[in-house]
Amino acid sequence: MAYDFDLFVIGAGSGGIATARRAAQYGAKVAVAEFDRLGGTCVNRGCVPKKLMVYASHFASHVQEAAGYGWTFEPGNFDWGHMIKAVNDEVTRLNAIYQRMIDNAEVALYKGHARIVDFHTIEVADQTVTAEKILIAVGGKPSRPNIPGIDLAITSDEIFSLAQQPKRMVIFGGGYIGCEFACVLNALGTDVTQIIRRDKILRGFDEDIRTEVQDAMLRHGIRIVNDELVSLEKHKDGLQVNLKNNNMVLTDVVGLSALGRTPRLENLGLENTRVEVEKGAIVVDAHSQTAESNIYAVGDCTDRINLTPVAINEGRTFADTHYGGKRRVMGHENVPSAVFTTPEVATVGMTEIQAIEKYGEAGIKVYRSRFRPMYYTLPKLEEKTLMKLIVHVQTDKILGAHMVGDSAAEIIQGIAIAVKMGATKANFDATVGIHPSSAEEFVTMR
């Protein structure tokens, strides 16, 4: 049977566009459908605009730190509106780049919501098209708890379009999104209260990392409250946040809901296929194949590792395998990640708890280094950096590397290469450090 396209990609986020472009470069006839702006969550409502806001949030502390080095600056004024416009202008510029990338790759773009009619047929923008293979890359969306008044809260998506900076902000959730925005807004001068259901933020990260970051956030003035959200209601002084333990917090009209994300699978037509969904995510095998032999899925909609570079790698692996004659499998172990809090977090490999569960306490050795970086000595600030290595006793291999501190993401990116290659503690010990730097601590721990 002749199809309109060799590959039809549903979703033009980072994973979908990477797949479409790579497949087209191999000569496949490719189309992609998107109802929203090109670039997906990362470009429009995630990594890119968030990181720009993180940069903006650091300048006030830089002024304070500069005084320790003899510099004197007049107190500055922060213009929220200027920052928001600049951030969104950059997002618009990136959208145009994504459009050019699609055009240059000769990928057909359908603007509209795509729905699968059967395992070879898609409806989009009042058209019906067919494809030999379908790849789903629809990403995720913010979760909203089903409680009274939740429509009064905004999600992390809307933070980038707030016309005015809130004087007070309540953030629900202790995951990386909530923690990042808590730090950004706090540093920009907003009075921040973060509500978490557990005793500590960043569930799933190494325990030492969680403690170090939470203590720093508290020290920087963020209030962290262990409680559960019950309801939201309007109040004459703003927005009233009602909590389970008879607590009540008043905030501005804005309340930020940061309780994770879920795959965006509604109205996708999966019921017309054999594609399986478990816990709200599309089930795929190691090759990103669903239960329908010609339908594949990558990225956050599969809820494996919800990171932009992972979605891109999954998509390119698919394209290499099916259209490039380079059969390979995307490895999901030892994937590095970062949390752009203040201080910054970066990690790769196993946490200490995970390593103990697999090898036992006697089977691992943990190295830690906690210190004040040289940068903070003259300003006389008690900012700390924490570095941690987890080593398998039997093989001497590095099982995990974790860091809290300035430039953690930049440092761990290099460490991740070594961990992925199976480096040992002896390899780290034999590496000459760059002095004076924080990064040298990773090769001098004893």
Image (spheres, rainbow, N blue to C red):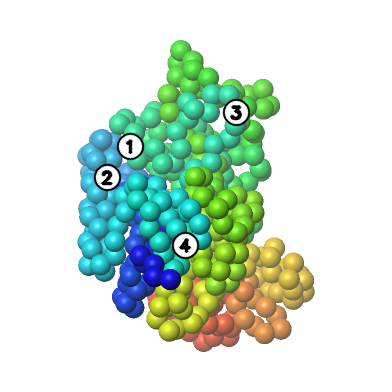
Q: Are marks 2 and 1 in contact (CB under 8 Å)?
A: yes
Residue 120's mark? 4
x, y percent for residue 184: 40, 43
Query: Which comes before the other along the chain, label 3 or label 4?
Result: 4
Q: Mark 1 to mark 3: distance in Å?
A: 24 Å
**From mark 4 to mark 2, how far is it between C-alphas?**
37 Å
Q: Amino acid type of disc 4?
A: His
For this rendering, which residue is in front, 436 or 117?
117
Q: Quadrant of residue 393?
A: bottom right
Which is nearer the N-term, disc 3 or disc 2? 2
- Of badges 4 and 1, the one in the foreground is 4
Residue 188 drawn at (x, y percent): 36, 39
- Is disc 4 in contact with disc 2, using a CB cutoff of under 8 Å? no
Residue name at image x 60 percent, y 32 percent: 146
Distance of label 2 from label 1 (alpha carbons): 8 Å
Measuring from the top left, give residue 237's x and y in whole percent.
45, 16
Q: Quadrant of residue 154?
A: top left
Rounded to the nearest whole Å, what is the CA distance between mark 4 and mark 1?
A: 38 Å
Q: CA distance from mark 3 to mark 2?
A: 31 Å
Q: Amino acid at mark 2?
A: Asn
Residue of label 2: 88
Q: Given contact means CB atoms under 8 Å apart, are the residues at marks 3 and 2 in contact? A: no
Q: Nearer the viewer, mark 4 or mark 2?
A: 4
Location of mark 1 (residue) = 161
On the rendered image, what quadrant is the N terminus found in?
bottom left
> What amino acid is labelled 3 in the image?
Ile
The answer to whether residue 240 is above or below residue 175 is: above
